[in-house]
């Protein structure tokens, strides 16, 4: 972002593929981890949830036993995977603003 003329050198096919593979891998691991976690719970009572899709918090309400720590863990994972990308995006915008403010002329900033 701070070196726009070097973009084609820095962001080549290899880097783009690596970024894609990392994001897909993390998404698959989180999805498989949560699916494994939901299947490890024991369920009793009604087996119907009042939702269009099976999300983890409604499934936790169907599980037997105390699931408060499990719910906290699910929310912590969600916050982590929302907060980290948001902070990375925010950091990139800060670098853009700093680069613009370091330009000596007003016409260059524009």
Image (spheres, rainbow, N blue to C red):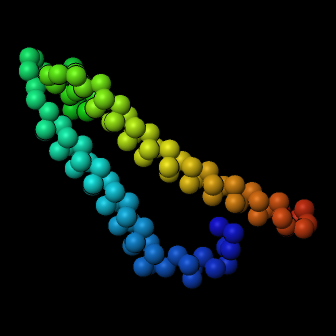
- Place of residue 86 in the rendered image (x, y in percent of width and height, measured from the top left): 54, 47
Q: Is residue 38 above or below residue 88?
A: above
Q: Residue furthest bottom?
A: 9
Q: Quadrant of the image for the C terminus? A: bottom right
Q: Residue furthest top?
A: 45
Compared to residue 52, the image places residue 13 above or below, namely: below
Q: Quadrant of residue 38?
A: top left
The picture quadrant where one finds residue 59 is top left
Instruction: Give left or right: position of 52 versus 93.
Output: left
The residue drawn where x is 20% and y is 40% is 37
Q: Is residue 43 above or below residue 16?
A: above
Q: Is residue 94 left or right of residue 78?
A: right
**Looking at the picture, does residue 49 appear above or below residue 9?**
above
User: Between residues 103 and 73, which one lies in front from this camera angle?
Assistant: 73
Residue occupying the point 62% across, 50% down: 90
Q: Can residue 110 be seen by looking at this rendering?
A: no
The furthest residue to the right: 105
- Which quadrant is home to the N terminus? bottom right
**Residue 40: x, y in percent?**
13, 38
Of 40 and 29, nearer the camera is 40
């Amino acid at each position: 972002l701070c070196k726009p003329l070097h973009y084609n050198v820095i962001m080549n096919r290899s880097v783009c593929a690596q970024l894609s593979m990392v994001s897909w891998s993390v998404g698959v691991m989180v999805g498989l981890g949560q699916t494994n976690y939901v299947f490890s719970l024991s369920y009793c009572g009604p087996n119907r949830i009042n939702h269009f899709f099976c999300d983890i918090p409604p499934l936790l309400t169907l599980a037997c036993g105390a699931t408060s720590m499990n719910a906290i863990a699910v929310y912590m994972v969600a916050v982590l995977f929302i907060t980290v990308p948001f902070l990375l995006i925010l950091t990139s915008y800060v670098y853009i603003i700093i680069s613009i403010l370091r330009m000596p002329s007003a016409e260059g900033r524009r």
